[in-house]
Image (tube, helix red, strand yellow):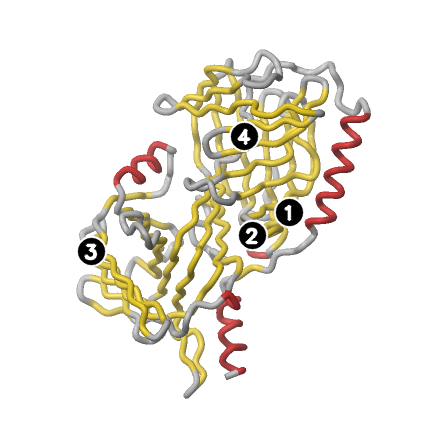
């Protein structure tokens, strides 16, 4: 059985990334940078003291799901995989993702309210409502899940995943998204427990059974297909797209209770100064918490936290050097991304370039290696409190 464990570990790691662990050194360098700024005049007081800018330039999303399931299959003319994220206690909260051969993805949700929220957020992905039949069983400690739904093209899909083993913490970790949605988002996915699919798993589309590839085969001992079942699946996403916002209110001074209010014509988002103490500042909204420092009427952002709907845990983007949004400056600094207690899942470099007319943020991941293909470039242009926000994924070799 040792061979089984080794081969299964390798199979799970095929979709994983290996994160560096330099959190202690990162925080020490950050603390030194903060001390240098707060105790010296490295930040001039002859700055633009207008606070009419985007306090949080990152369009991030974080959710936790009880279950994530995924099966790959062969020879279908359009699709290569189907996956779903499920809240087991409330199966009216299922999101199915179909991945096409060109790596673009289509979302199907069985909750109209959630679909409406996603669309109002300005998603550029094709997203549809559909009824989903769902059933979960436990057979000798091994989960098995059935789903049936109809696509927007009226294809009938029957999905059945049966696990090869009980889910195990041995196979927890960061998930490599491979090429999926490579131009529309940067997903950071962490599974707390996982197992491979067995050969009883099936994908049937319009009555035709599609072959699921074998991933691990140890005769007599074990056979695992290219499919995955995960429990306590956490997914953070840095999204791309384009938005136009009106800044309808911004602080006249840095003080408790002062706020930024942004409107996209349909919804308003508020960021309120909720803490101001000893040079440190916190700015809160419904889903985000921005932390930073204050020096000479300028706010330097140190981190942005994103919370799931149940407010348990967070995704954290953290910078070694603070980013001052109302200063003309170019800053190069390290960043790291944590999910809950899992630190340094993504690490890399941020280049921030602000010339007062346009703010540019370029997140360039370094570890794990698969993340290097998903550089995020964000541009924010402000013309008389009318903001154009654009986020794109750039190739590793591209520059500003």
Q: How far apart are marks 1 and 3 (CA)?
A: 42 Å
Disc 1 and disc 2 in contact, CB within 8 angstroms: yes
Q: How far apart are marks 2 and 4 (CA)?
A: 22 Å
- Mark seen at residue 371: 2
The residue at the point 47 percent across, 23 percent down is: 270
Q: Which of marks 1 and 2 is nearer the N terminus?
A: 1
Task: Give x and y (percent) for residue 242.
Answer: 44, 32
Q: Which of marks 3 and 2 is nearer the N terminus?
A: 3
Q: Earlier in the sequence, mark 3 or mark 4?
A: 4
Q: Distance between the residues labelled 3 and 4?
A: 41 Å
Instruction: Classify residue 358 as left or right of residue 310.
Output: right
- Mark seen at residue 155: 3
Q: Nearer the viewer, residue 1 or 82?
A: 1
Query: How would you rate the neighbour count of disc 4 (Cα within 10 Å): few for under 14, some for 14-19, many for 20 or more?
Result: some
Q: Mark 1 points at which residue?
A: 348
Q: Which of 328 and 25 is in front in this view?
A: 25
Disc 2 is placed on an element classified as: helix
Q: Distance between the residues labelled 1 and 2?
A: 9 Å
């Amino acid at each position: 059985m040792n061979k089984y464990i080794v081969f299964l570990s390798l199979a799970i790691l095929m979709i994983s990334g290996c994160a560096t662990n330099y959190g202690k050194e990162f925080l020490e360098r950050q603390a030194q940078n903060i001390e240098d700024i707060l105790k010296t005049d490295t930040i001039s007081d002859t700055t633009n003291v207008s606070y009419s800018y985007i306090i949080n330039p990152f369009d991030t999303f974080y959710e936790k799901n009880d279950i994530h399931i995924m099966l790959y299959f062969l020879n279908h003319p359009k699709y290569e995989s189907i996956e779903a994220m499920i809240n087991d206690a409330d199966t009216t909260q299922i999101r199915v993702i179909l991945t096409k051969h060109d790596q673009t993805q289509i979302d199907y949700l069985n909750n109209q309210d959630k679909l409406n929220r996603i669309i109002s957020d300005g998603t550029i992905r094709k997203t549809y409502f559909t009824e989903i039949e769902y059933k979960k069983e436990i057979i000798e400690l091994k989960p098995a899940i059935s789903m049936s739904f109809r696509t927007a093209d009226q294809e009938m899909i029957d999905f059945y995943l049966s696990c090869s083993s009980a889910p195990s913490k041995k196979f927890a970790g960061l998930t490599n998204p491979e090429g999926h949605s490579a131009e529309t988002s940067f997903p950071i996915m962490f599974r707390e427990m996982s197992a491979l699919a067995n050969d009883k798993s099936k994908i049937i589309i319009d009555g035709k059974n599609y072959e699921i590839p074998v991933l691990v085969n140890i005769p007599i001992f074990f056979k695992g297909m290219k499919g995955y079942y995960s429990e306590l699946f956490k997914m953070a996403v840095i999204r791309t797209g384009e938005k136009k916002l009106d800044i309808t209110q911004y602080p006249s001074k840095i003080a408790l209770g002062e706020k930024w209010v942004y409107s996209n014509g349909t919804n308003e988002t508020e960021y309120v100064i909720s803490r101001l103490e000893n040079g440190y500042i916190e700015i809160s909204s419904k889903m985000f918490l921005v932390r930073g420092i204050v020096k000479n009427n300028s706010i330097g952002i140190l981190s942005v936290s994103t919370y799931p709907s149940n407010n348990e845990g967070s995704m954290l983007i953290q910078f070694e050097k603070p980013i001052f949004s109302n200063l003309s400056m170019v800053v190069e600094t390290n960043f790291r991304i944590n999910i809950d207690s899992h630190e340094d899942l993504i690490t890399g470099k941020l280049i921030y370039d602000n010339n007062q007319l346009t703010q540019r943020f370029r997140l360039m991941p370094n570890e794990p290696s698969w993340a290097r293909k998903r550089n995020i470039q964000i541009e924010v242009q402000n013309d008389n409190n009318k903001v154009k926000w654009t986020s794109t994924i750039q190739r590793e070799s591209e520059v500003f």
